[in-house]
Amino acid sequence: FYRAEPGFLLQGAMRAVVPPNNQTREKPAGTAMQIGHVAWAGGGAGPDLFITMSRVGGFGGSHTVWGEVTDRASLALADKLVNLPIEKGLKPGAMRMIDSPVPFTVHPAG
């Protein structure tokens, strides 16, 4: 994970895990994303992703939601990550980049 916006999102990338997906199905425009939704970032089809840290109105029409963080321990970990120290010297309104990006591993379900 490399970007942290408290109360909004935690963003990372799965470049080594999944190729971009050119066949996406988006929620209808205006659909609100809920806490813990996992979606492709940038309105694209990956491999950058984000986890919503709050209810976000209107994002469903431009970001494909493909997963969900549902257990309290995982949501608490995401909250801890989103509050990590960020790069110094960021201008107001700039994206908040985590000072030391956090690697993660994806395991198959099951």
Image (spheres, helix red, strand yellow):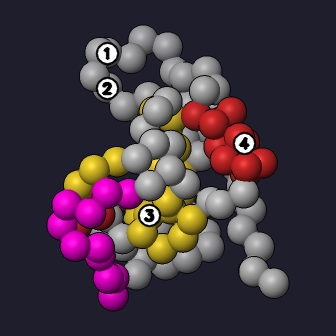
Q: Magenta stretch: residue 25 in it?
A: yes
- Chain-order first, disc 1 or disc 4: 4
How far separated are the C-alphas under marks 1 and 2?
Answer: 5 Å
Q: Earlier in the sequence, mark 1 or mark 3?
A: 3
Mark 4: few, some, or many residues within 10 Å (few <14, many ≥20)?
few
User: Mark 1 or mark 4: which is in front?
Assistant: 4
Residue located beneath label 3 in the image = 39
- Residue 106, x across and y down, in percent: 72, 68
Q: Which residue is mark 1?
A: 91
User: Can the viewer see residue 50 in this picture?
Assistant: no
Task: Pick whichever of labels 3 and 4 is earlier in the sequence.
Answer: 3
Measured in 3D between alpha carbons, the distance from the residue under mark 1 to the one under mark 4, in whole angstroms, is 27 Å
Look at mark 4 in the image and give the residue it sits on.
77
Q: Residues within 10 Å of mark 2 (few under 14, many from 20)?
A: few
The residue labelled by disc 2 is: 94
Residue 30 at least partly seen: yes
Magenta stretch bounds: 22-33
Task: Choose between 32 and 47: the one closer to the eye.
Answer: 32
- Residue drawn at (39%, 17%) of the image: 90
Q: Is residue 91 left or right of residue 20?
A: left
Residue type pointed to by label 1: Lys
Circle 3 crowding by C-alpha within 10 Å: few under 14, some 14–19, many from 20: many
Sequence-first disc among 3 and 2: 3
When the figure is inspected, residue 11 is found, relative to residue 81, above or below; the finding is: below
